[in-house]
Image (cartoon, grey):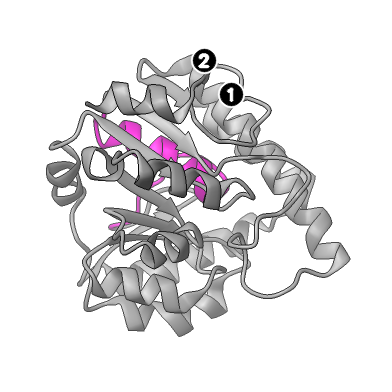
Amino acid sequence: MEWKKKIYEHAVKELNIDTAKDREAAYILSKMICSYSSSLDEVKLILSKFKTAIVLGAGPSLEQDVENAARLGIIDKAGIIAADGAACLLLKYNITPHAVVSDLDGPRDCLLKASELGSFIFVHAHGDNIALIREIVPLLLRGKILGTTQVEEIACLYNFGGFTDGDRAVLLCETLGVDRIILAGMDFGFEIGKYSKSGELTSKELVRKRKKLRIGKMVLEEFAKNSKVELYDATSGSGGIKGFKKITWERTKELVE
């Protein structure tokens, strides 16, 4: 859709993104995974068992949100989609996400473990992660792997739109046909969650990360204007995202019953 293209163009200018490198990354990833790729229909079949998908970002509220969801017995009643490092905390609770959306900059051990346990891994290609693609993707080929790009779709790669792992996971859910999306661990604030990225960020990386989060929030607010899916935000520390109804975890339990 046109709004998705416009946000990508905004991100290119804001972050000085090399679109040629984005295309190169997509080509490299497609060559590596297309002989092994799962189909989107396989993921749809799993998610079709649930009317609701919970998308977990790696923000500062993630631990509180997972604790609430686990305490209230919500996890088993929804499709669980983790944005990269959020999978680490889920695995600590012995929760295997149905899918993990990752550009490979989170803790790789968690990604590999989720893959081993049966999660669908959506690997995103962009110009800054070519080295990670070459290093990590071969370790994921025995599992359920699919590829995404932020430029033109090529071979087996999809472009659902979105920019960060979290908002891209939300747009993926709409493609998968869920009726309701609930956000968790999606703060989009000044503080960076400890599950958001491997290692310490330099001051330059921190500035860039915060810009990416602002773009991610922009994606979700535009998505809300264009989507017919029921949209809720149960993130404990979130100031709110336009178009997503703020909801408590107790109310979330009622929705998924």
Residue kind at label 2, given as amino acid type: Lys
Q: Find residue 221 and name its label.
A: 1
Does 144 appear above or below 192? below
Left/right placement of residue 25 relative to residue 18 reads left
Task: Say whether residue 152 is magenta.
Answer: no
Q: In which quarter of the view is residue 201 placed?
A: bottom right
Q: Residue at x 68, y 75 (%)?
A: 199
The part of the chain drawn in magenta is 156-178
Percent x, y of residue 27: 43, 66
> Real-space Cα distance between discs 2 and 1?
7 Å
Residue 243 pos. (x, y %): 54, 16
Camera sees residue 110 = yes
- Identify which residue, 22 or 53, lies in the foreground: 53
> Quarter of the image holding residue 139?
bottom left
Q: Nearer the viewer, residue 95 or 183?
A: 95
Please say if 33 is above or below 39.
below
Residue nearest the viewer, comparing 150 with 201: 201
Residue 166 is a magenta residue: yes
Q: Residue 245: x percent and y percent?
A: 51, 17
**Amino acid on which the number 1 mark rests in the picture:** Glu
Q: Circle 1 — which element?
A: helix
Disc 1 crowd, CA 10 A, few/some/many (<14, 14-19, 20+): some
Residue under label 2, please give it. 225
Q: How crowded is the residue under tag 2: few (<14 C-alpha within 10 Å), some, or many (20+)? A: few
Query: Does 119 sit left or right of 171 as displayed?
Result: left
Q: Above or below — where is 33 with respect to 47?
A: below
- At x 40%, y 59%, the residue is 90
| Residue 133 in view (yes/no) | no
Given residues 91 and 30, the one toward you in this image is: 91
